[in-house]
Structure formats: C-alpha cells, structure tokens
Image: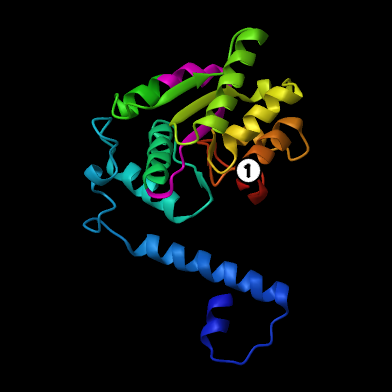
Amino acid sequence: ALQPLLASGLSISWAPEARAWADAQTRAYSRREVMLTHRRGDGLDDAATVQAGNGRMPMVHQCQAVWSLSEMGAGAGLKDDMGLGKTTSALLAWHRAMVQRGVHRVLVVCPKSVKLNWLQEIEACFNGSLAQLRVYLIDGTASKRANTLSYMRHVAEKEPEQLGIAVVNYDLLRSMNELAWNSLEKWCAGQCVIADEFHYCKDLGSKRTKAVQHLMRLASLRLGLTGTPVTNTVEDMF
C-alpha cells in the first residue's frame, strides 16, 4: 500500500518516525525489485564470480542466494530446504563480504551435532584457496576452550585483517564466563555472525536467543540459516 501512495504525487506531511519507516520500506522494496527482475544471464548464475578460488563450484541457486544475501545488507535469512547447500551459500556470502567490505572474521553458532560438519564444509568450500584462513573449533575441556578463545581475542585485537572462522554450539554460549564472553564480543565486532538452525532462537525470552541476538547486533553481516518450515505463526519467520 505504501508504494502506490508514494507514487500518487500527493503532498504528504510525515512525522519524523513515519518518514524514517517509509524510507526503510522504500529501500527494502527497491532491493526486492532488483532481485526479482534479475534472471539467468545477468551474472547471478555465473559460478565463476562466486566461487572462492579452487573451492567447491556453487550451483545456480547458491549463486543467486549469495548475491541476494549480499544485497540485503547487514542482516538476512536463508531458508532453503534441507540438502540445498545453505552452508556453502552462507560461507560464500561471507567470502563476498570479505572481498568487498573487508569482513575478515566469522562466528558460526550451530547445534553441537553439526559442528564437525561445519569444519568439513569450510574445507570443501574453500579447498585451501584462502591460504591465510584459520579455523577455530570452540570445544573440548574448559581449559581448551579458554585457550582457543584467548587466541581468538589476540587475533581480533592484534591481527584484525587475519581471516578466521570460529565454530561454537548454542549451549556453550550460556555457560561462558565474562572473559570468554568478552573475547567473543571482540571477535564479532564489525564482522560476520552465522546462526545455523536459526529456529533454535525462536524463544525471544531464552538465554540462548538473547546471547545470539547480542552477538549479531555487534556484527556487520548477520545470517540466519534454517530449513525448518513455519508451523505456527508468521512471527516464527523472525
């Protein structure tokens, strides 16, 4: 209803809050129109422009997903069905942001059961193409996790252009002490956060959801991945 109103030529007096909302809606509408009007032959299905060096060759729908996620700006959700390669799409979207915007670090938050799968996907996606990439698995004993987080903090503070991907599971976020949590905050500040199986954050009042929301607010690129269909209300989409 907003677009016909704006196109009508009527003189409208906007309250500041309403003007800001209308501007945001117009920008979103414009991005949507650009994405919907692109078709094959426009570069969205050109895997060579999306592939990371000698890494896995993306499929057409993944190329389009990477382009769309980039166009959506700071935050976006990818809700492809299971088996369509959301992990690869998200990693390549980060790679695009790294090349274009200097986003050097990623935090992947996921269920414990798929942490090792993420390590395998990272290897397959980049296949050694990013020689400087370091991958950190936040797991094991409390001492081992503390050492990993301490090193991540060092990288964030002293080597800000070092490429890095850290993988942590949702439940560990709730048990971190202040020092560990501060290390994660520094790692995420201005960088990328990917929340896999994002429907885990459906309960807005839970500690898990609040922890992920906080880290995402610090990031400049926020991606939520889920292949679980909406079963109750539209609110589940958010």
User: Under tag 1, what secondary structure?
Assistant: helix
Callout 1, which amino acid? Leu
In percent of width and height, residue 233 lies at 66, 48
Q: Is residue 21 left or right of residue 228?
A: right
Residue drawn at x 30%, y 24% is: 128
Question: Is residue 43 depicted above or below 124 in this figure?
Answer: below
- Which residue is outermost to the front? 158
Residue nearest the observer in this picture, 21 or 229: 21
Residue identified by numbered label 1: 218
Residue nearest the observer in this picture, 178 or 33: 178
Say if residue 1 shows up in the picture: no
Please state the extent of the stretch shown in magenta in the rendering. 100-119
In percent of width and height, residue 99 lies at 36, 44
Which quadrant holds the N terminus? bottom right
In the rendered image, residue 103 lying in the magenta stretch gets the answer yes
Q: Is residue 146 left or right of residue 223?
A: right
- Which residue is outermost to the right? 205
Question: Is residue 69 depicted above or below 57 in this figure?
Answer: below
In the rendered image, residue 151 lying in the magenta stretch gets the answer no
Question: Is residue 216 depicted above or below 147 in this figure?
Answer: below
In percent of width and height, residue 175 lies at 73, 20
Residue drawn at x 58%, y 36% is: 188
Q: How many marks?
A: 1
In percent of width and height, residue 232 lies at 66, 43
Residue nearest the observer in this picture, 162 or 200: 162
Quarter-of-image position of residue 186: top right
